[in-house]
Image: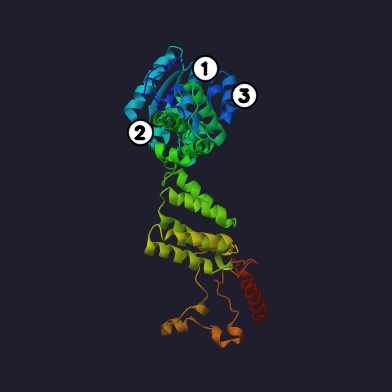
């Protein structure tokens, strides 16, 4: 995994103070901070009152997990922490390392500790280790052989063992905002001793292209300097030609996927069609499977709208089928139409809530038989045993409503579905109230 200031070096046994920077290396590497105070965009961790600043004030470190997107400085901060407290710094990547590599690192750390020096072990992409490999860190963390700093772009709650999480504090690294990316560009211009040859609008566009990744904004700036001629200044279109468009940071199987589908779902639930369309388009633009989005819209129609507008489920299902028929890009408009319809429809989760409550009751009372009067009697023996006795055919009763009880006798009557007063459910609520009165009258 790379970070804000360039790709990490290969695994190494010892480091001391920061090495001299190669004046001919990549710009991001040349601008790598030499102290926590130089780190941009993570002030909640490295600022005067930041979590890591307070930790360092004690003169020692505890094991931590750095969680955040690429290009936010996780590797660099880990190295600076080791330098600050004088720990030996070792770095491995879970992508390229196995059990044998871990054993060597642990043995070296034990030897180093016996000589009076502590080791900070930085594990890049720690979520790539399997459960057994993650467990191997526990004894060396507990006996003080290493201080672990793990870095992950994925949610530690889902990807790391509970035992490992209980021994390490999770610290969140945030994506860069426009302000912190602009500060990095200013540092780059100072290092290069010349301004970026960009018009103000193009400069803003470059920052947007970086998508919160500090390393990316420096790499893009370096490409601009390489590609422009003397005296040339690029506008937005010229920038696009020079650097092309950087793909959005979006892993369809990981956090980016779940974060955006959650945002889409909540925007629909919150009746915000503009935000819902925005997140739908972000996912489509990032390459999400449109049929997956269609299926999620069908789910939203049932969960968040339900019988407040029964047409919502039909609209969502039709949009999914329309995309399946038309394909991309023509079918995407049907998904957009369904998204707006769902977001602007009256909302009810009454069916969703009733379903969960009924499922709990089904699990609790799953062995009870229905009452005999509603059971069919296909054989003479069953009829003689009382199956079907007393059943009233509803269509033969006034209002086509018999009011008889359908729950198992041992359960008594339960209530799951509570319609709202919104949309079509207002009328359903009226009917249910009327039936409740009739049921009460006819049970006397």
| Res 367 visible | no
- Residue 396 in the image, given as x and y percentages of width and height: 56, 88
Residue underneath mark 3: 48
Q: In the rendered image of this protein, does residue 333 appear above or below residue 251?
A: below
- Residue 384 in the image, given as x and y percentages of width and height: 46, 84
Point out which mark residue 85 bears: 1
Point out which mark residue 95 bears: 2
Element assignment for label 1 = helix
Mark 1, other Cα within 10 Å: few <14 / some 14–19 / many ≥20:
some
- Residue 419 in the image, given as x and y percentages of width and height: 62, 67
Residue at left 49%, top 21%? 193
Element assignment for label 2 = loop
Mark 2, other Cα within 10 Å: few <14 / some 14–19 / many ≥20:
some
Which quarter of the rendering shows the N terminus?
top left
- Residue 375 in the image, given as x and y percentages of width and height: 48, 78
Q: CA distance from mark 2 to mark 3?
A: 34 Å
In the image, 99: left or right of 183?
left
| Res 335 visible | yes
Dot 2 or dot 1: first in sequence order is 1
Residue at left 54%, top 54%? 276
Nearer the observer, 344 or 30:
30
In the image, 305: left or right of 13?
right
Q: In the rendered image of this protein, does residue 197 appear above or below residue 372?
A: above
Point out which mark residue 178 bears: none
In the image, 412: left or right of 72?
right
Q: Quadrant of residue 420?
A: bottom right
In the image, 269: left or right of 293?
right
Residue at left 46%, top 15%? 17
Mark 3, other Cα within 10 Å: few <14 / some 14–19 / many ≥20:
few
Q: In the rendered image of this protein, does residue 376 appear above or below residue 429?
A: below
């Amino acid at each position: 995994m790379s970070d804000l200031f360039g790709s990490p070096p290969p695994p190494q046994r010892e480091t001391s103070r920061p090495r001299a920077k190669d004046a001919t290396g990549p710009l991001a590497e040349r601008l790598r901070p030499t102290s926590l105070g130089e780190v941009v965009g993570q002030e909640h961790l490295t600022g005067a009152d930041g979590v890591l600043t307070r930790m360092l004030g004690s003169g020692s470190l505890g094991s931590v997990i750095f969680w955040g997107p690429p290009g936010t400085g996780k590797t660099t901060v880990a190295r600076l922490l080791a330098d600050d407290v004088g720990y030996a710094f070792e770095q491995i990547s879970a992508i390229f390392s196995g059990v044998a590599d871990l054993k060597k690192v642990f043995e070296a750390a034990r030897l180093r500790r016996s000589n009076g020096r502590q080791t900070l072990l930085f594990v890049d992409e720690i979520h790539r280790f399997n459960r057994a490999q993650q467990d191997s860190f526990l004894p060396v963390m507990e006996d003080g052989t290493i201080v672990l700093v793990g870095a992950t772009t994925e949610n530690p709650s889902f990807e790391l063992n509970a035992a490992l999480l209980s021994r390490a504090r999770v610290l969140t690294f945030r994506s860069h905002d426009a302000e912190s990316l602009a500060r990095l560009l200013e540092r780059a211009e100072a290092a290069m001793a010349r301004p970026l040859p960009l018009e103000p609008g193009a400069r803003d566009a470059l920052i947007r292209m970086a998508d919160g990744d500090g390393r990316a904004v420096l790499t893009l700036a370096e490409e601009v300097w390489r590609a422009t001629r003397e005296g040339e200044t690029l506008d937005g279109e010229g920038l696009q030609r020079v650097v092309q468009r950087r793909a959005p940071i979006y892993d369809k199987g990981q956090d980016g996927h779940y974060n955006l589908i959650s945002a889409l779902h909540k925007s629909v639930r919150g009746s915000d069609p503009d935000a819902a369309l925005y997140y739908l388009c972000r996912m489509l633009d990032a390459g999400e499977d449109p049929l997956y989005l269609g299926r999620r819209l069908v789910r939203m129609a049932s969960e968040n709208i339900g019988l407040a507008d029964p047409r919502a489920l039909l609209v969502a299902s039709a949009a999914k089928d329309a995309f399946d028929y038309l394909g991309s890009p023509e079918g995407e408009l049907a998904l957009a139409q369904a998204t707006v319809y769902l977001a602007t429809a009256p909302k009810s989760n009454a069916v969703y809530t009733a379903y969960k409550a009924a499922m709990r009751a089904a699990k609790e009372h799953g062995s009870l038989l229905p009452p005999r009067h509603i059971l069919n009697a296909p054989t003479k023996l069953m009829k003689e045993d009382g199956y079907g006795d007393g059943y009233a055919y509803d269509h033969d009763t006034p209002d086509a409503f018999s009011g008889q009880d359908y729950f198992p006798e041992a359960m008594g009557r339960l209530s799951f579905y509570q319609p709202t007063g919104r949309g079509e459910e207002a009328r359903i609520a009226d009917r249910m109230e009327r039936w409740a009165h009739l049921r009460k009258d006819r049970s006397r």
